[in-house]
Image (spheres, rainbow, N blue to C red):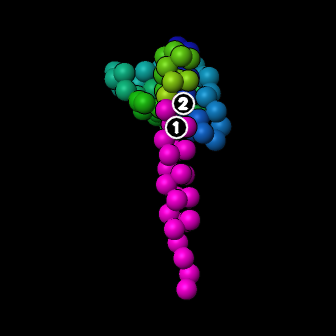
């Protein structure tokens, strides 16, 4: 089964792998090249779903960084 991994999408990009569902659960996946089980929402059956998830992760990270910048800009040393 071809899958797309988004666990480290912000640092490594969306990675394509082949894998199989593990423990009779659609939430767990054992993918080639990954020594651990990957859980939802870190793997996707279609590239379109993976890209949508990676975009969501990117937007959340941008928001988080903007909040950090605002906090630092308000910080004053006297």
Q: Residue at x 49, y 50 (%)?
A: 64
- Whether residue 19 is visible to the viewer of this picture, yes or no, is no
Q: Nearer the viewer, residue 28 or 15?
A: 15
Q: Residue at x 59, y 35 (%)?
A: 9
Q: Residue 5 magenta-drawn?
A: no
Q: CA distance from mark 2 to mark 1?
A: 6 Å
Q: Which residue is mark 2?
A: 55
Image: 18 above or below 28: above
Q: Residue 70 magenta-drawn?
A: yes
Q: Position of residue 42 (x, y in %)?
A: 47, 32
Image: 44 above or below 34: above
CB within 8 Å, label 2 to label 1: yes
Q: Position of residue 7 (x, y in %)?
A: 53, 36
Quarter in which the C terminus is drawn: bottom right
Image: 20 above or below 38: above
Q: Quadrant of residue 33?
A: top right
Q: Position of residue 14 (x, y in %)?
A: 61, 28
- Asked whether, in this view, residue 29 is left or right of residue 26, the answer is right
Residue 67's tag is: none
Q: In the displayed orientation, state which residue is furthest to the bottom.
A: 78
- Badge 1 density bin: few <14, some 14–19, many ≥20, Cα 10 Å: few
Q: Which residue is mark 1?
A: 59
Which element carries disc 2, helix, strand or loop? helix
Q: Nearer the viewer, residue 12 or 75?
A: 75
Where does the magenta region start and end?
55-78
- Badge 2 density bin: few <14, some 14–19, many ≥20, Cα 10 Å: some
- Whether residue 55 is visible to the viewer of this picture, yes or no, is yes
Q: Residue at x 55, y 44 (%)?
A: 62
SS majority, magenta: helix
Q: Nearer the viewer, residue 37 or 78?
A: 78
Q: Residue at x 62, y 27 (%)?
A: 15
Number of residue marks: 2
């Amino acid at each position: 089964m071809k899958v797309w991994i988004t666990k480290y999408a912000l640092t490594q990009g969306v990675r394509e792998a082949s894998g199989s569902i593990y423990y009779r659960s659609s939430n767990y996946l054992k993918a080639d090249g990954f020594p651990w089980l990957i859980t939802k929402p870190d793997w996707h059956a279609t590239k379109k779903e993976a890209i949508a998830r990676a975009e969501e992760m990117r937007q959340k990270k941008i928001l988080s960084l903007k909040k950090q910048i605002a906090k630092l800009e308000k910080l004053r040393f006297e």
